[in-house]
Image: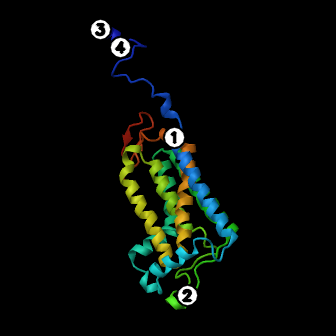
Amino acid sequence: MTDAAAGAPGVATSAQPGPAPQAASKRPRALLVIGLIGLALFVLFGVAVFQNVDAPLTQPLDDAWRRLVGASAVENVSWVVPMFFQYLGELPGFALTILLIPIWLFVIRRWRSALFWITAELVGNMVVSQVTKNLVDRPRPAEDLVNALFGPLFRVDHGSFPSGHAVSAGILIIAVAAVLPPAKRRVWWFIGALIGLGMIWQRTLINAHWFSDAVFGVLGGASATLIIWWAFSTLLAKDYGKPLFRRADPTTGAPQALPAS
């Protein structure tokens, strides 16, 4: 092939990649299927709890877990690891997930990712968590003098199912994975598993929730976010080539260092 032919319009060369395959623009069905199954399990368990809020089918397991894990004094739960999970679901975590991360995604011109993130946080925290709490209204763990256990060791609102902290953890696990490029998710899945398990442990350690409240809270938050990820997947794919920690040049799309503040 001559140089003239190689440079002619309409002639594909190895240096001129063609458009991405059409299949790449399709939404991954697995996200929707897994999300719907998880959300269905969450709803079914919520209905089961609603039928008998004082002693649902998991109450024997919940009682056994509380006897094993529950703490009897604030002094036993005020060290760094439990407090990390406590603050993750309170104002510091709210500032990070509702304000700082979406703002940063807009700053680095990943506005599609920012819209996905905001949608996931609002749907998960308002619908999965608060609406379900008000509908089910399961009592929180109460005083248990036989086992030297008391009610929640920190201030809580009404309704034990689901754990709002656990719902937030489930949202965070899936939302971060969705924003990361596929090649960089492996390490995050390990970290995310630790966050989910740690939140279940902490919420039951401080007697704020029953074990099932925390487990299904993580499941509900994660499942709802998987469905939202599926809905936003074609938009998110357009952001994967953009850097997460540097602003892209608006003219070339190349990474551009942020000016020092």
Do we see residue 245 in this rendering?
A: no
Above or below, comparing residue 212 to residue 179 in the picture: below
Position of the N terminus, as image quadrant, is top left
Question: How many neighbours does mark 1 have within 10 angstroms: few (below 14), some (14-19), or many (20 or more)?
Answer: some
Q: Earlier in the sequence, mark 4 or mark 3?
A: 3
Question: How many neighbours does mark 3 have within 10 angstroms: few (below 14), some (14-19), or many (20 or more)?
Answer: few
Residue that numbered label 3 is attached to = 2
Residue that numbered label 4 is attached to = 7
Could you say whether the residue bearing mark 3 is in a helix, strand or loop? loop
Marks 3 and 2 in Cβ contact (< 8 Å): no
Three-letter residue code for mark 3: Thr
Question: How many neighbours does mark 2 have within 10 angstroms: few (below 14), some (14-19), or many (20 or more)?
Answer: few
Three-letter residue code for mark 1: Pro
Q: Earlier in the sequence, mark 3 or mark 2?
A: 3
Query: Whole-percent x and y of residue 124?
Result: 59, 58
Instruction: Find the distance from the CA under tag 4 to the CA under tag 3.
Output: 9 Å
Is label 4 or label 2 in front? 2
**Residue 144 marker:** 2
Q: Earlier in the sequence, mark 2 or mark 1?
A: 1
Above or below, comparing residue 97 to residue 67 in the picture: above
Q: Nearer the viewer, residue 67 or 196?
A: 67
Residue drawn at (42%, 84%) of the image: 76
